[in-house]
Structure formats: structure tokens, C-alpha cells
Amino acid sequence: MASSSRKRRVRSTVRLAEVVRELPRRSHDLSATTVRASQRWRMLEAVTEAVARDGYAAASVADVIAIAGVSRKTFYEHFDDKEDCFLTAYDVMSARFAEALAGVGAEGSLEERMEARIRAYLKGLAREPAMARAFVVEVLGAGPRALARRERVTTKFAELLLGETNADPLLRRAIIGGINDVVAAALLGGADGARLVALVAPLTAFFRRAVAGGA
């Protein structure tokens, strides 16, 4: 039950603002904290959408505030600039995704647990193509701070997905890097969620062979 709850949270993470939007609109029914949280989540959603749509370099603060429906003043009350907003979104999504994966593959043989995790990883990306494009592809062009974040996240996911195997840390990173490279190429080619899901079977087979070879 816990793992199912975690997976539901990941699927809905970038949609949290939609829940808040359903609350009563009258100002006296909404606390300042709720309004501020709604604004922040809308902007995190918006930067993800803008970056996925236009690319990190072309996306602007103007795009973010237009999508989120907030003022420029509100944006700068929450974030220093576009980079700060994007990196915050990257940190939040990565943390929630990792939390969900931590509850997957608790039973079965080592191979079954590993495959359950890699399938959950790939299907998680496939459920949110915009998020996947922003955080798998566009992060590469978002500057040195983003690359440093990506380095830490790649190491964390390699350990999370492969930490129970005998594969050394370098091989773990190579396996995750190879999978992400295939996903990135598919996204750059215009793949939607259905086409990403189609990658699950061949990439799981690759994963199985790579882990067996490394062990």
C-alpha cells in the first residue's frame, strides 16, 4: 500500500497546483500560506512546461509567469531568476521520483527486484513526457549548476536502482547513463508517452544483460 501511495504522489507531483486551484476562490477562504504554495507550485509546473516546449535557453521568466498566471513581482518573491526556478523544480521532481522508486521491488529475487525498479523508472518518465524532456534533455544545456545537480541525481538513481548488485559504481552509472541517453534521443525525436512506454521492454532486456555482465 505504501509503495502504491508513493507512486501516486509522483504521478501527481507537477499537478499539485491543480488541486489547490479547486479550492474556494474567495480570498477569505484561502490562507496566505495556501495562496503562496499554490503560486509556487504553479510556477514549478510552468517552468517545466516552458522548458520542455521551447528548450531551456529559449524559455523565459515571461513564459513562466504567463503559464502560471502570476505577476513578475510574485515570481521574484519566490525565485532569484529562471535558473533558480528550474533547479528548484529539478530538485523537487528528482526527490519525489526517488521516493517513489524506493518503495518498488521489495519482494522477489534480486533480478526481479531490479527489473521492477527499472520498469518503474522508465514508466515514470513515460507518464510525464514534458517532465522527462525538461529533466533528461534540457538539463544538459542549463549551465554548470544544473550539470552538478544532474551528476548527484545520476549517482543517486544508479545506487537506488542497482545498489543491491555486485556492479561497481562506474558500471552502475554507465548503465543508467545509457538508458537515459536512449530516452533522451527518443524525446528529441518527438516521442510521446506511448512511444516511451515501448522502450520499457528493450531497455529492461539491456539492463538485465548489463547487470549480469557486470556481476
Image: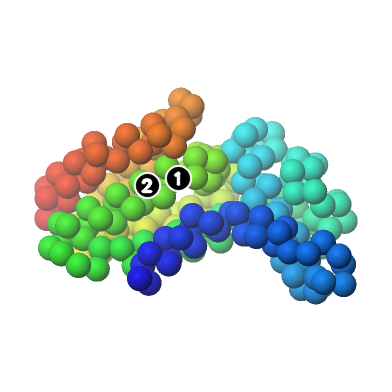
Q: Secondary structure at mark 1?
A: helix
Asked if the residue under mark 2 is in contact with the one under mark 1, i.e. CB atoms within 8 Å, the reply is yes
Determine whether, in the image, residue 118 is placed left or right of residue 124. Answer: left
Q: Residues within 10 Å of mark 1 (few under 14, many from 20)?
A: some
Determine whether, in the image, residue 162 is placed left or right of residue 187. Answer: left
* Viewer-nearest residue: 40 or 182: 40
Residue 57: x, y in percent? 66, 36
Determine whether, in the image, residue 9 is placed left or right of residue 169. Answer: right
Q: Residue at coordinates 72% horizontally, 58% vertically from top-left?
A: 21
* Viewer-nearest residue: 142 or 37: 37
* Viewer-nearest residue: 87 or 189: 189
Q: Amino acid at mark 1?
A: Arg
Q: Residue at coordinates 29% horizontally, 51% vertically from top-left?
A: 118
Q: Residue at coordinates 17% horizontally, 51% vertically from top-left?
A: 211
Residue 213: x, y in percent? 12, 47
Residue 5: x, y in percent? 43, 67
Quarter location, residue 162: bottom left
Residue marked by disc 1: 127
Q: Amino acid at mark 2?
A: Lys
Q: Secondary structure at mark 2?
A: helix
Coloring applied to the structure:
rainbow
Q: Can you say which quadrant of the picture contains the C terminus?
A: bottom left
Disc ID at residue 123: 2
Q: Does the rendering let one see residue 180?
A: yes
In three-dimensional space, the C-alpha distance between marks 1 and 2, rounded to whole angstroms, equals 6 Å
Q: Residues within 10 Å of mark 2 (few under 14, many from 20)?
A: some
Q: Can you say which quadrant of the picture contains the N terminus?
A: bottom left
Disc ID at residue 208: none
Q: Residue at coordinates 31% horizontally, 36% vertically from top-left?
A: 199
Q: Does the rendering let one see residue 84?
A: no
Residue 214: x, y in percent? 15, 51
